[in-house]
Image (cartoon, rainbow, N blue to C red):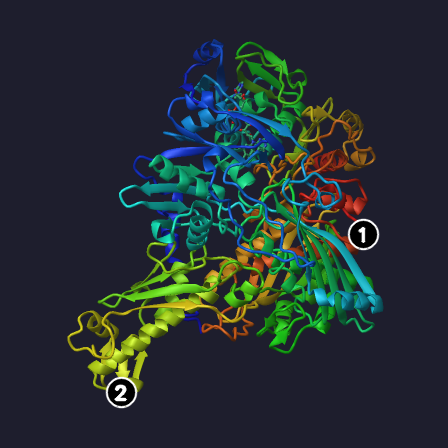
Amino acid sequence: MYNFELVKPSTLQDAVAALKSEDAQALGGGQTLLPTMKARLAMTEQLVALSGIDEIKGICTDDDGRICIGGATTHTAVAEGATGYPALASLAARIGDPAVRNRGTIGGSLANNDPSACYPAGALASNATIVTNAREIDADDFFRGMFETALDEGEIITEVKFPVPEKAAYEKFIQPASRFPLVAVFVAKFSDGVRVAVTGAASDGVFHWSEAEEALSSDFSEDAVKSLTAPDAVGMISDLHGDGTYRAHLVKVMTARAVKAAV
Amino acid sequence: MPKDTGIGASPKRREDVRFLTGKGRYTDDINVAGQTHVVFLRSDVAHGTIKSIDIAAAEAMDGVVRIFTSKDFEGVGGIPCGWQITSRDGNVMQEPKHPVLAEGKVRHVGDPIAAVVAETESQARDAMEAIVVEIDELPAVIDMKKAVAEGATKVHDELDSNLCYDWGFVEENRDAVEQAMKDAAHVTTLELVNNRLIANPMEPRVAVGDYTSHDGQSTLYTTSQNPHVIRLLMGAFVLNIPEHKLRVVAPDVGGGFGTKIFHYAEEAFCTFAAKALERPVKWTSTRSEAFMSDAHGRDHVTKIELALDADHNFTAVRTETYANMGAYLSTFAPSVPTWLHGTLMAGNYKTPLVYVNVKAVFTTTVPVDAYRGAGRPEATFQLERVIDKAARELGVDPVELRRRNFIREFPYQTPVAVEYDTGDYDATMDKLLTMIDRDGFEARRKDSESRGKLRGLGINCYIEACGIAPSKLVGQLGARAGLYESATVRVNATGGLVVMTGSHSHGQGHETSFPQVVADMIGIPEDQIEIVHGDTANTPMGMGTYGSRSLAVGGSAIFRATEKIIAKAKKIAAHIMEAAEGDIELKDGKFTVAGTDKELAWGDVTLAAYVPHNYPLEDIEPGLEETAFYDPNNFTYPSGAYACEVEVDPETGKVDVLSFAAADDFGNVINPMIVEGQVHGGIAQGIGQALLENCAYDEDGQLLSASYMDYAMPRAHDFPMFQVDHSCATPCTHNPLGVKGCGEAGAIGSPPSVVNAVLDALASAGHDVGHINMPLTPAKVWAAMNNAGGTGSGTAHGRSVDGPAAKI
Ligand SMILES: Cc1cc2nc3c(=O)[nH]c(=O)nc-3n(C[C@H](O)[C@H](O)[C@H](O)COP(=O)(O)OP(=O)(O)OC[C@H]3O[C@@H](n4cnc5c(N)ncnc54)[C@H](O)[C@@H]3O)c2cc1C
């Protein structure tokens, strides 16, 4: 690890100010950033810890019935506290191990947009709104490819608002080494249609499986998924743990299972 | 009846208290005053010529003490290899130099190029990043079969080729085996890969070199399974330091699994640099470094053929193996695919003819050497897999096919040099069948099917040769060292004992089980006995811990030394009690005279030995301390039968292990709890190899599985509770304890059970899959069921053999 300064502001305003300086970077739970820094793959002059800012932590329900989660809320807090959205709570409960969940945050996970991360699938399938210190961004506009998001330099995710679907489920097939998703699918059934978000499969990161969305919107059943052909393997990740064909196949299997499990 | 003390009891492991409360004293806990830190600059390419190394900027950086390159090691020896194999043509193996720091060329990702010594670790790392190295890349040598083809890029320019040796065993049987193959009623052929593994002990390697100029003594603290071997190899072959000027200390060792047997360049470096700088030098491997510098294990590519007559008797076995040596010869590397592998190819069966051919190959990968089981898992896997395949081809019960061919008369001279002293393969198989409710399997399979899952049962046997072993024999087989073990038993005046042994625990619980032996012999409580090991300064020359040898060989040395102690103590007791020596009995810590009520406590006699007022000084010396060196006349041969039941998800290919049972014959057992723990750990590693673990390189020689993000370690929830049994015991006939060794059995016996079970599950759904190469990842199993294209990568041998479901 290279040397760095650590500041721990207690208000959002101070954090935004601190992040204005060049070479400053936000620190959420550090579960991605710190290992990268330890391996000297990342270097930063100043880390701005968000964990001391109470106003961006916690879970509540807004007037539209949306579950609103502060950007610095840990996975454990969501697993235990997002009772109004069981599929999301269950997603959070299956991230990493207890140590990771007690530190890692929803804001960090979305900002990082790892192509194999869990939260991006939850946010995209739920049609969530990502709130920052500067604006609100629709999930559909937020994810921009592997490790790329719509966030500007120094922009902080302060809150994520999840509309609660009628039924939803997250099916995660783990990569045996990292236990991140090899492929995971979040299915959310709203009154006006079904959204299916896939993570782990594509090099560009989380994506909508639109054929499945269409089929499920008219017939929300496992059979509707089974009658589809698996998505194109082109653009799928091919690595030690499975090639694109296998991943594409898993997308279909996990989607069907999510439909079956949806509550 | 379970005992609560002595041999056969299961006292809790005394060392665990300190391990579990953070009080273990590991090498990294050692910090010597004035210590510096070294960081190695390692090659990030697999193969290349070093054009230049510019250290000028790095040298000027804060805290840098000195930067070393190969220039500083002129006149220093290479890291030696401890075993020499002779090829079929009578030539000895090709043995390249293994420099401490790369000379002229780098030969694998992780090969050390330069070493930066600085005041702190982070200063050393900063300076390391400022070194500029120019490397002209050469093609990587990854695929073993291509590596030995005409015109292949050579890993070592000074050698004739990449072929280290071409070994035939038993060469005289070659033609007879060929004939038996022709005459056979049926021949089953199987091509397979024994996947390359990384040992991943919890504690990474550490070395601290120290030199004291006032007495010219060098000391190396290191994470080693065998400090004396390190002292001998490093002192005599690399640094030219006589043993009386060199001390090697291995304190608590946090796991090794073989990879801490070997003498490594970093050890030699720290010892050398400490003397050159007259300051202590410390190196602690990072986890990333461990992946690319700890010796790897396995990595065999094999074709095996099994010939049977019309009655299904095995008539011959022939195997051809390409064994990866990596870039250099690690300490015991040449012995693993040969003497630890070829000699086991008879297995539990009376196959009259066996021929084993092994081609050891240099590649631009990390050196490969012994890993838990070392050669024996590779032998067991191919034999037990081909037998299962034969049973399927012939439509016979795989258990009955094995039984038909079991060896039943002992001692049994195999056609592959070794002689099994005892065993009862029917007994362990019978026991296993009572443990697994084989009759209920069909009902369980139906239940799985009702849940959309495929269920499979895999059963196999294993035999291993351990308690390694007779010096004379291993000498004939090419070992450059003896393989005895030693113990000094020191009885103190007040009756407590210190046992100094050349064995060294790296997790096996020696501090608990060795005292059980001594306590049992004398009849005193175990807490009267302290075990000292791991320091060449206060233990007799020993060969260390590997090959399940510590109890069978080291324990026997302790037994012999304790016998000498008891004999002398009886003489003293006879003198004091004025009785004939032959009438003295020692029981429960008391000396008695047969037929009288005279008695003396153990402590009275030990005190007399050191306060020899009333003492037979004319006959014996005062004091009570004895040393024994024990060199057995054979290996020991643990054996057993294992069974695994799995469920396969046909939609995803995911395998769940539902049950695992092991019936082992370890001969006599000193501490059943420790034995069970050893078997549990071994099975966990075996299932890890079968389902999860895979060290993979790409064609450019980059290590793909270079962290835990890609190298899948097994975790507790991957396993059911194992059922283990060691009640079938045929005691070893040639060591005084009748013990055989249990450290590796689990890892040797379990991989074929898992693979046999998965293939059985697939067969139940009509998937006639001849074989799937380990690890049986979901992707590979799914591809095998669906005849889909290549998925994932194989071992260093690479993709050429690693179609997901090579239909053979
Ligand atoms: C062993 C292990 C297993 C894991 N398993 C999984 C898994 O199964 N599924 C999964 O999804 N993830 C997994 N993770 C990743 C984990 O969920 C991380 O916590 C998460 O990806 C990053 O969140 P963080 O709060 O730790 O962010 P950090 O590591 O602190 O930061 C990550 C990035 O986000 C930025 N950032 C942090 N917070 C904010 C914010 N509020 N606004 C804007 N930018 C911000 C940082 O500057 C940095 O660039 C695992 C991690 C580990 C170590």
Where is residue B52 shown, x and y percent of the image? Answer: 55, 26
SS for callout 2: loop
Q: Nearer the viewer, residue A136 or B757?
A: B757
Residue B582 in the image: above or below residue B566: below
**Residue type at numbered disc 1:** His
Whether ligand 1 has any atom under 8 Å from the Cβ at mark 2 is answered as no
Q: Nearer the viewer, residue B293 or B188?
A: B293
| Position of B636 relative to B237 (above/below) | below
Question: What's the chain of the residue with tag 1?
Answer: B
Q: Horizontal placement of B717 versus A230: left or right?
A: left
Q: In the image, is B494 to the left or to the right of A81?
A: left
Instruction: Give B437 or B737, whichever is nearer the viewer.
Output: B737
The local secondary structure at tag 1 comes to loop
| Name of the residue lying farthest toward the front | B75
Residue B501 as seen in the image, left or right of residue B337: left
Q: Would residue A29 be visible to someone looking at this image?
A: no
Instruction: Characterize the local packing of mark 2: few (<14), some (14-19) or many (20 or more) Cα atoms within 10 angstroms.
Output: some
Q: Which residue is mark 2?
A: B580
Is label 1 or label 2 in front? 2
What type is the residue that disc 2 sits on? Answer: Ala
Whether labels 1 and 2 share one chain? yes
Image quarter hosting the N terminus of chain B: bottom left
Q: Where is residue A107 drawn, in percent x and y?
A: 54, 22
Q: Residues within 10 Å of mark 1 (few under 14, many from 20)?
A: some
Q: Nearer the viewer, residue B196 or B613?
A: B613
Asked if residue B664 can be seen in this view, the reply is yes
- N-terminal of the pair, mark 1 or mark 2, is 2
Tell me if B727 is positioned left or right of A188 in this view.
Answer: left
The circle on residue B767 is 1
